[in-house]
């Protein structure tokens, strides 16, 4: 792809579309009463996914865009664990019959900051409300700098089945620039500890667009990652939003690669993984052919949620913790993001819901269109009332068609291979809410 086309499109700010509508379109018109009502409609034994958000870290990385805060006092962590258990009980008061937890994911922040005793007590609280599927996928995001053999063994005893390591980049100069120094040998040792504990499913998170990163260094990181044989890899473009994240002000913006370099880095990383036999999934995931995510692609079951691409079939996701988002059939609900406000709400015996969105039929329709584009890189609008009902959207896509990013054949829209990295731009054409929020998102590539 020529550099002019990359510059024209790669720096346009668009949502990542892990949900539709996106979180910026949630409103405070949705609150605890709505959440309680929506929870009460869950059916006995219904499979659900659970998410636990832990918004604390012992050290805050410069690049981090997550809802996370630096913490040094152990009592703050202990208090937060108690709040999580209280919130789980509050949710349980509105669930009339025990749903089946088919997936459980711990994220953050650094969820391992709870230590395994804290995690065990939270699992006990969850078991008071939910029945755990014997085949539950139990995943946790880990900082590889903190994974000892003993800790890995304790995670296995808790039933953890998948670990996701935040690798980002193996280049020492890049690690120094982003405040995340973790040499390759350290990560390799943590991988070994996890596998020796009997946890066989392993994911890596990598990034491109980081300060001092080059095409060559990004390729080397991908090659080194392959030697550790993770089942799946997620590759995210760094979103530099220092006005929203104070910690990102520690990053030297002059050291960041430009749009063309970002694109070439992402392209080189993808080529490296595909050459190694991985299956490309969506815009930023890769997996071994035998991994469940790759199988979901082959069988047309790939979906997208707040963790990115997934084979999770559950229609309901229940989130716990500050800023956590729940996805129910009626809509989205997000907890209070401020840790103090979250603590006060839960301590007072109230659900911590602060904002959300009630789905309309049109939301569902457009959400399905965006989901097809993000997961399959094509959509047939005849399944959604026909192309005539999307005249404006198709018109907005004309420049992308002219530049060879997609083909339009009647009501069928299909991205070309060179257009697939820019699928978020195509999805954005169907986002009714986007005109009100043209900035504040990450760039397209």
Image (spheres, rainbow, N blue to C red):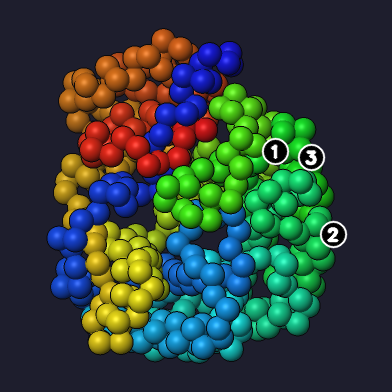
Q: Secondary structure at mark 2?
A: helix
Outermost residue toward the right in this view: 185
**Percent x, y of residue 438:** 31, 35
Q: CA distance from mark 2 to mark 3?
A: 15 Å
User: Where, by quadrant of the figure, is residue 352 drawn?
Assistant: bottom left
Q: Please give the name of the residue rendered at 26% of the width and 70% of the height, measured from the top-left corner.
A: 353
The mark total stands at: 3
Question: For mark 2, does the 10 Å Cα neighbourhood hold few (<14), some (14 to 19), or many (20 or more) residues?
Answer: few
**Percent x, y of residue 17:** 39, 43
On the image, numbered disc 3 is attached to which residue? Answer: 220
Mark closer to the chain start, 2 or 3 = 2
Is the residue under label 1 in contact with that under label 2 (CB below 8 Å)? no
Is the residue under label 3 in contact with that under label 1 (CB below 8 Å)? no
Above or below residue 214? Residue 83 is: below
**Percent x, y of residue 117:** 58, 89
Q: Nearer the viewer, residue 211 or 249?
A: 249
On the image, numbered disc 2 is attached to which residue? Answer: 185
Above or below residue 160? Residue 415 is: above
Q: Is residue 293 left or right of residue 389?
A: right
Q: CA distance from mark 2 to mark 1?
A: 20 Å
**Percent x, y of residue 291:** 63, 52
Q: CA distance from mark 1 to mark 3?
A: 11 Å
Q: Nearer the viewer, residue 288 or 115?
A: 115
On the image, numbered disc 1 is attached to which residue? Answer: 213
Question: For mark 1, does the 10 Å Cα neighbourhood hold few (<14), some (14 to 19), or many (20 or more) residues?
Answer: many
Badge nearest the viewer, 1 or 3:
1
Q: Secondary structure at mark 1?
A: loop
């Amino acid at each position: 792809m020529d550099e002019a086309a990359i510059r024209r499109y790669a720096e346009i700010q668009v949502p990542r579309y892990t949900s539709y509508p996106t979180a910026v379109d949630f409103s405070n018109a949705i609150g605890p009463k709505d959440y309680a009502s929506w929870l009460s409609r869950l059916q006995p034994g219904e499979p659900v996914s659970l998410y636990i958000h832990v918004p604390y870290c012992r050290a805050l990385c410069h690049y981090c865009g997550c809802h996370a805060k630096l913490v040094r006092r152990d009592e703050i962590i202990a208090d937060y664990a108690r709040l999580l258990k209280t919130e789980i009980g509050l949710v349980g008061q509105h669930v009339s019959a025990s749903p089946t937890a088919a997936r459980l994911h711990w994220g953050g922040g650094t969820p391992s900051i709870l230590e395994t005793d804290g995690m065990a007590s939270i699992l006990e609280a969850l078991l008071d409300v939910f029945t755990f599927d014997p085949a539950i996928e139990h995943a946790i995001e880990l900082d590889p700098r903190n994974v000892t053999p003993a800790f890995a063994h304790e995670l296995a005893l808790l039933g953890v089945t998948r670990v996701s390591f935040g690798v980002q980049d193996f280049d020492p100069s890049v690690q120094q620039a982003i405040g995340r120094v973790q040499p390759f040998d350290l990560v390799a040792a943590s991988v070994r500890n996890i596998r020796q504990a009997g946890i066989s499913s392993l994911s890596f998170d990598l990034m491109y667009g980081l300060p001092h990163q080059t095409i060559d260094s990004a390729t080397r990181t991908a090659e080194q990652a392959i030697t550790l044989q993770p089942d799946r890899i997620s590759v995210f473009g760094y979103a530099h939003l220092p006005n929203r994240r104070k910690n990102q002000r520690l990053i030297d913006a002059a050291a960041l690669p430009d749009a063309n370099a970002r694109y070439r880095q992402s392209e080189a990383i993808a080529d490296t993984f595909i050459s190694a036999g991985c299956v490309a999934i969506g815009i930023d995931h890769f997996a071994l052919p035998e991994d469940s995510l790759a199988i979901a692609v082959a069988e047309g079951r790939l979906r997208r949620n707040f963790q990115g691409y997934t084979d999770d079939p559950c229609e309901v996701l229940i989130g716990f913790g500050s800023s956590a988002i729940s996805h129910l059939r009626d809509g989205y609900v997000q907890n209070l993001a401020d840790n103090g406000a979250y603590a006060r709400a839960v301590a007072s015996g109230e659900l911590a819901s602060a904002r959300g969105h009630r789905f309309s039929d049109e939301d569902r329709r457009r959400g399905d269109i965006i989901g097809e584009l993000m997961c399959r890189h094509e959509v047939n609008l005849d399944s959604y009332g026909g192309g005539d009902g999307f005249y404006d959207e198709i018109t907005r896509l004309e420049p992308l068609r002219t530049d060879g990013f997609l083909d339009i054949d009647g009501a069928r829209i299909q991205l070309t291979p060179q257009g697939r990295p820019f699928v978020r731009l195509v999805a954005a054409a169907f986002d009714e809410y986007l005109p009100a929020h043209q900035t504040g998102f990450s760039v397209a590539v």
